[in-house]
Image: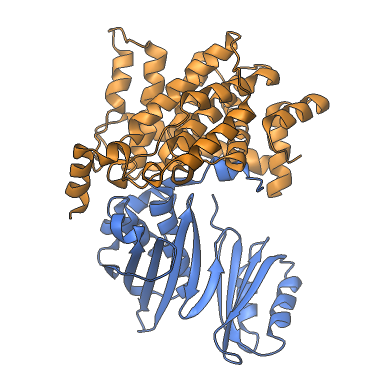
Chain colours: A orange, B blue
Amino acid sequence: MYFKDSSSIIKYCNDNQLSLFEYALSYEMSLSELSKEEILTKMHEYLDVMKNSIKEGLKSSKGGKGKIIDRKAGDVYKSALSSHKNASGKTMVKAISYGLAVMEVNVTMGRIVAAPTAGASGIIPGVFKSLQETFELSDDKLVEGLLVAGIVGSLIAKNASIAGAEGGCQAEVGSGSAMAAVAGLYMLDVDIKHIFHGGAITLKNLMGLICDPVAGLVEVPCQKRNAIGVANSLIAIDMVRSGMESYIPFDEVVEAMKKVGNLMPSCHRETGTGGIANTETGIMYNHKIFGE
Amino acid sequence: MKNYSVFDIVGPDMIGPSSSHTAGAAKISFMASRIFGLDIVEVKFELHGSFSKTYKGHGSDKALLAGIMGIRHNDSRLRDAYIIVKGRLKYKFKKVDLGEVHPNTVRITMTSSTGESGVVQGSSIGGGNAIITKINDIDVEIDGEYDTLITAHKDKPGMISKLSYALSQEHINIAFMKVFREIKGKHAIMVLETDDKISKESLKHLKSIKGVYKTIYIPKGGH
């Protein structure tokens, strides 16, 4: 029941004719000793919080600003509704506006679901809402997807890390994007043999990404990193559904990500001292907000 | 290797922006106010390490104030803690060096309307998880992940069996149990984490046991 990697889970699911969701549910029931109903009810609550954070976040005028960033999700969303063309298409622009919305709610002390962390909390809601709109998925299906996302994250947490302080941004936005991609492929009924390719592709695309928050705040670059996390998941889902696969299997990509994280200097792991945090402008913001 | 619950990964639901600086901070002060158990009129937060450096940027100050007033880490009122606190209690934030402790540590000194005071210290250890590490001068370890019962009682033979027997009579299953004390034969603190909720009547009953000075109940933190 408790497996070390995705290939063992896939084998177990195939041998027992279980879907990834059914596996996730029995895993959680066994581990947390909660009933099926309790688990699904809690996930439904989380889904509601996620959807509500998108709704709140799109009302850009409300709820103030961050210490550095402005609320922009509403403007991005409006641009998807306008008659003008968008470079990346209406579906993509809407999806990233959802991811931005959640991050902007987070920054202004609104209510979100950390998934896997607060700093990467926009990705799963953005991808899930976008897929729900495009493919007319039910809320029950999204709840199944959240459990699948949880299993994917638990494998990454177990074999690598989901904390920016340990593995850099690849561990937060990378992991969130992988969770959303695998869950998305599950929700679109892709065969279990193929769905972890989505996780491998998303993690590879963001491998090595450092965590370099300006002034140590969850604002710059986190807001826009959530947008790339959403986009990364959606393109991976489309690639896998068209028959593309990752040449390197998911489990090996996770292992590589752990090694890359271990090699990262501490200035690139959420200390706010490297990358863009250590630029002239980054340092200026830090002084402006915290003095000294 | 640890097996993570899916709710360790998806969750907690919380008020942003930072699981360790906001949600964790709110959990510490919520637990602290429950442990103190009296009507708080004055509170002092002594912030150590990363807490002292960045508390304003992450809203840790609002989270700490909210928790003291009983507002939880996922309650939208947290953002308005400074408005809600007006006229309710006096507060003070101070940057300190508490020595060799976790970088996100706060020491909370609370004073009641009757002039009693108590000190609770806790650390935010990542992912929105928090632990209480000290109650007054006694080192403890409480994380609020279970329904938690804390008793202050006389350090003498038979107290633990009396308390655990009383719980078994109420059909409350003890998941974990630890006893802490400062000086032999004086005060002891026992922390019991249970699988079942503890009712007000049960708490009253436990408190009536001879040698028990105080019982404190902290309902499960929830993700």
* Place of residue B168 in the rendered image (x, y in percent of width and height, measured from the top left): 75, 71
* Place of residue A291 in the rendered image (x, y in percent of width and height, measured from the top left): 18, 54
Q: Residue at x 37, y 35 (%)?
A: A103
- In-front residue for pair B117/A88: A88
Number of marks drawn: 0
* Place of residue A192 in the rendered image (x, y in percent of width and height, measured from the top left): 69, 21
Assign the N terminus of chain A to one quadrant of the image. Answer: top right
In the image, residue A206 sits, relative to residue B89, either above or below, namely above
Q: Is residue A55 visible?
A: no
Q: Is residue A238 visible?
A: yes
Give the farthest residue toward the right.
A15
Q: Residue at x 65, y 79 (%)?
A: B205
Q: Residue at x 24, y 34 (%)?
A: A70
In the image, residue A104 sits, relative to residue B52, either above or below, namely above
Left or right of residue B177: residue B35:
left
Res A292 quadrant in image: bottom left
Left or right of residue A155: residue A121:
left
Left or right of residue A16: residue B185:
left
Res A144 quadrant in image: top right
- In-front residue for pair B18/A283: A283
In the image, residue A204 sits, relative to residue B170, either above or below, namely above
In the image, residue A14 sits, relative to residue A88, either above or below, namely below
